[in-house]
Structure formats: C-alpha cells, structure tokens
C-alpha cells in the first residue's frame, strides 16, 4: 500500500505548502509557499531530508490526520497542542505514526502557522514546479475532511528527535530595505515609521499582514498618482488611509499603492508568526547589511541538522512503557540502593 495521510478533521485554512514558485510573476502568480519557511527547514532537519518537500500548513486551527502505512511526522512552526491516539506529542519534534494511528492537533497557543512535515514529503499535484496551494489565485482549495494525501516515504528511523526552533516568535524588530517609492515619504514620516510600535492586526492572512498602531497614518506625497507595478512578498504597502500592510506569500503580483520599503525575506517569518498583542518595530538597513542578514539566516537554517537530538520523553505519556528494557546493563554487582 502506498503510504498516505487521511485528513479526518481540517481547520478552515489547512493547505499543502512548500517553498513556493520562482519565475511565475509574468503569469500573474506570486511565489506563494509556506508563510513560515523556517518551519519547513526545521521539519526537514528533524526528518533528515531536503527542504524541497511539501508539508501541511495549519493556519491558527489544528485538525486530525490518520496514517495509512507506518510514517514519521515532524511538528514545527506555531506551537499547537498535539497527541497521537490520545498520548501527548511534543512540538518541534518528530514522531512515529503507525498505520491506523491518528495525530490530533489543537489550535495554536503561540504563533499562527503550524506545520506537519512527513518523511518523504506530501505528493500532492504540482503546478509550475511547486505543490503549494494558493486558493486566492485559484491554485487548489483549502483541504477538507476525507482528503487522502500520498506520502513519498515511510520508516521510523528518525522518530523521537527534537530541536530548539529558530527565534521568530513574539514579534520584535524587522529590517527594511528602501525601494523605488520610499522617496515619496518625507524624512519625518520615515522617522516616525521607525519609531512607531505596531501590532499585527487580526485582520491578516496569507495575502497581507495589516499593521495596527495608535497614531496617525503614513501618507505619501503624490501617492494617488503611483502607477501599478510589480510587487513582491515583504513589500510594505500604504493604503489611502495611511495604514501599512506587509505583503505575504499569496500577495497579488502588481499594485498601485505606494510602498514604503520591503521587509527582508529572512524576517517575514517573524511577521507571519506575530500573535495577538505581539509588537513589531521596523528599521531601515542598507543593502550590504540586508545581504549579510539573509546569508546569516540561510546559514542558521542549514545548521539546524546539527542541533537535532533525542527528546526526553515523559514516562506518563508512553502507553507501552512496560515493554521497554528499563534496566538494560544492570548486573548483580550494581548497587541500586
């Protein structure tokens, strides 16, 4: 039997995502892909495989999946409560999921986007070199109960491992590059933008993160005369009322709102995972600083495999505890007192 995951319960925005598409802007299709690409790198490190594999993305809410065949899964991204057939399953770790067992995941307790990666990856249909779904652009639709997703591999050799996740939760500082329309904003307006503490508005999604703040909006001189041109994830668009939006993976490919700057790609996971009450600050950086930050982030993702280690399991959560050899190596001469 080909190994697979059966979706028995799904949240409202559960999709399949990988690292997205490149070179598709001319077709009117944005890059797409995981809202938190760091989570895919963490899942790949736990499973000992490449980052090109597709995974389940759970937006805020969880769901339940049942294994068809013996599998191994990794849980990364936004922290969610998880259990396998009723037994607690640690987050930022990989677990054996045997044939017929059900992994059940609750809503996020920290962050917004959680991920279930599978050994061998999910084998959903590809379009233009990616399995990523983008329902807004008509590429797939949110997953529904009853869906079966084929899996590219099986095995248990990587189960029981964990890692410390990369730092990107709880809001924080975001680095911004100036762009072709930054000059439409006065120096005073840009300074105020850097000094403002924002909150990620709940009215945010995979297209854009709306930024809320208590002061006046940010108005560009001549903003209404900006011609539509290419936009990319990370661009900070300012709408007519002065509200900033950070564009996310499923953003449109062209737009006419003035763009104050562009958040570095390595900082976008911090935007994606900012939760209610988390604050965000922005600071402009030069090109060399931006390139150095991006290289450092890529190096940190590449080094994740070195941080993978066996997890310490809670004995109360091991259903077959008595089947383990707990005193292996003990001899008659050992003092157990």
Image (tube, rainbow, N blue to C red):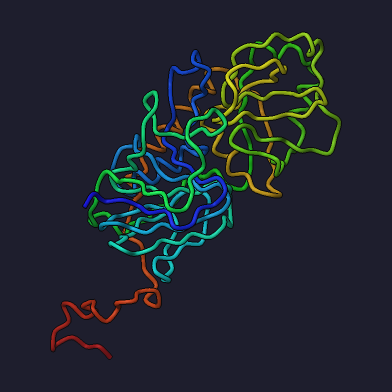
The front one of 290 and 109 is 109
The answer to whether residue 8 is visible is yes
Q: Position of residue 286 (x, y in %)?
A: 59, 18
Q: Quadrant of the C terminus?
A: bottom left
The front one of 18 and 304 is 18
Which of the 4 quarters of the picture holds residue 131? top left
**Left or right of residue 159, residue 182 in this image:** right
The residue at the point 51 percent across, 62 percent down is 81
Residue extending farthest to the right is 216
Residue extending farthest to the bottom is 337
Instruction: Using the image, determine if residue 124 lies above or below residue 320.
Output: above
The residue at the point 69 percent across, 19 percent down is 259
Instruction: Using the image, determine if residue 332 lies above or below residue 271.
Output: below
The answer to whether residue 48 is visible is no
The residue at the point 54 percent across, 38 percent down is 269
Q: Position of residue 156 (x, y in %)?
A: 24, 57
The front one of 99 and 41 is 99
**Left or right of residue 314, residue 152 in this image:** left
The front one of 140 and 277 is 140
Q: Position of residue 323 (x, y in %)?
A: 23, 79
């Amino acid at each position: 039997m080909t190994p697979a995951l059966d979706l028995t319960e799904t949240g409202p925005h559960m999709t399949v995502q990988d690292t997205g598409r490149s070179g598709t802007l001319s077709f009117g299709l944005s890059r797409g892909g995981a809202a938190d690409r760091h989570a895919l790198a963490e899942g790949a490190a736990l499973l000992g495989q490449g980052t090109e594999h597709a995974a389940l993305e759970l937006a805020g809410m969880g769901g339940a999946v049942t294994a068809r065949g013996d599998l191994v899964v990794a849980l990364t991204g936004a922290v969610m409560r998880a259990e396998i057939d009723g037994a607690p399953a640690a987050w930022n770790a990989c677990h054996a999921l045997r044939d017929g067992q059900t992994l059940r995941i609750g809503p996020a307790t920290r962050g917004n986007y959680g991920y279930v990666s599978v050994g061998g990856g999910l084998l959903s249909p590809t379009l233009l070199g990616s399995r990523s779904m983008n329902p807004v652009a008509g590429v797939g639709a949110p997953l529904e109960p009853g869906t079966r997703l084929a899996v590219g591999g099986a095995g248990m050799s990587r189960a029981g491992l964990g890692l410390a996740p990369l730092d990107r939760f709880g809001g924080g500082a975001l680095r911004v590059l100036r762009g072709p329309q930054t000059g439409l904003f006065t120096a005073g307006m840009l300074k105020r933008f850097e000094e403002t503490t924002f909150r990620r508005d709940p009215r945010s999604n995979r297209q854009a993160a709306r930024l809320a703040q208590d002061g006046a909006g940010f108005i560009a001189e001549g903003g209404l005369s900006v011609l539509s041109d290419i936009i990319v994830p990370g661009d900070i668009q300012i709408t007519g009322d002065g509200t900033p939006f950070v564009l996310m993976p499923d953003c449109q490919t062209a737009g006419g709102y003035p763009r104050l700057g562009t958040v570095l790609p390595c900082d976008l996971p911090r935007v994606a995972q900012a939760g209610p009450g988390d604050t965000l600050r922005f600071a402009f950086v030069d090109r060399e600083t931006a390139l150095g930050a991006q290289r450092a982030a890529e190096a940190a993702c590449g080094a994740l495999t070195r941080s993978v280690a066996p997890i310490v399991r809670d004995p109360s959560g091991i259903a077959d505890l008595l089947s383990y050899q707990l005193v292996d190596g003990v001899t008659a001469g050992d003092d157990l007192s």
